[in-house]
Image (cartoon, rainbow, N blue to C red):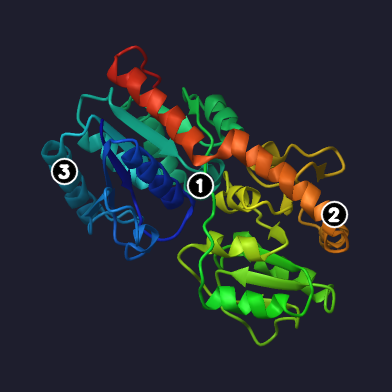
Amino acid sequence: MRILHVVTRSEFGGAQGVVRTLAEAQSAQGHSVGIAAGLEGFWEAFAGMDRRVKPIPLPLLVRAIRPKEDLMALVALGALFRRWKPDIVHLHTSKAGALGRLAAGVDRRHIVYTMHGYDQIRVLNRRMLFLDKLLARRCGAVVAVSRLDADAMRRDGYTVELIPNGVSQPVDSMSAQAAAIDRLRSEGLPIVIMAARDARPKRIDLCRALASRFEGKAHFAWIGGEPMPTDPPAFHALGSIPQASSLLSRADVFLLCSDNEGMPLSLLEAMAAGLPVVASCAGGIPEVLSPEPDGGSAAGFVLPNDIDRMSSALNLLIESSARRRKMGAAGRNIWKTRYASDIMAGEYNKLYERLLAGRDVFC
């Protein structure tokens, strides 16, 4: 198959991670694959990508609504589709999804649109959601990445396929951040790791507050932002790194305090690395970890963003290496059987084949 992925931005993010993982898996299967993306992010999400995947920069494709640039991006996408002649055009994120469906013209059967984090888009970007609903039938299939999103989209009138995100086994590598974590480990205390950008919905403030309760008992390593003078002694901001997952094997517990999430790749990567998880009950997180009413899960804890409850859950893991090993192994098994990258790629390939055979049109 000749597959062209289109995503609005090329910065680090969940959608970009899915695009890269999927494109590399499809390329390894022998398909001809390209990624077209805007330059917001300076192509950082795709640096060092499998060389068999063709990179196609689209400088005019931007997240903000800018009528002049959007019209030029629409023309550029149409020209790209005619030049590349893909069997499948796979659109990701709302802006690329809108322009890509318009550029594809009347032949909608071979267009797949994955909406990453519908619940967030519905709340934060109503203008794009209105346009998306107008274009809902201009593609062969619309895909949700979590059951939460799929249910919400169906209530709003979409016909939806559900294909959960998937990730590859994290690969350890040496870096300045890895060396910093190794120095912390040499003190003999457990490492709690967080991998999230410095944005309000990620609740790094809560991570800092939690770290202040564990001075002398654990170190909290944050990948994704810079230190502040007021950081607690146990909180270590280590900056950003292209592949934060490469650091997971050096940690003991994974912490995720987001207020909003779709199907977070960082959570799946932590489970693939065998880490027990303490996470908020936002977005698609509960459906991954299947918590009991008290928040406990075989793979960790899923709780409201309440500092006392999260602190108690972290304390249980920090004080017991046996509990960490047991929950980490359970999480890795969940990843391996449900959220591995080859499972995700296989489901998308089945969808592509059905569309190409003309057996199903879902929109």
In the rendered image, which quarter contains the C terminus?
top left
In the rendered image, which quarter contains the N terminus?
top left
Q: Position of residue 182 (x, y in %)?
A: 65, 76
Could you tell me if residue 169 is visible in this image? yes
Q: Position of residue 132 (x, y in %)?
A: 39, 36
Q: Amino acid at mark 1?
A: Ser
Q: Secondary structure at mark 3?
A: helix
Q: Position of residue 147 (x, y in %)?
A: 60, 32
Label 1: how many Cα within 10 Å (few below 14, some 14–19, many 20+): some
Q: Secondary structure at mark 2?
A: helix
142 sits to left or right of 83: right
How many numbered marks are there? 3
Return the disc, 1 or 3, that comes first in the chain's sequence.
3
Circles 1 and 2, Cβ within 8 Å, touching? The answer is no
Distance between mark 1 and mark 2 Cα atoms: 26 Å
* Residue hosting label 1: 168
Identified at 52% across, 37% down, the residue is 145
170 vs 358, nearest the viewer: 170
* Residue hosting label 3: 80
Identified at 48% across, 25% down, the residue is 160
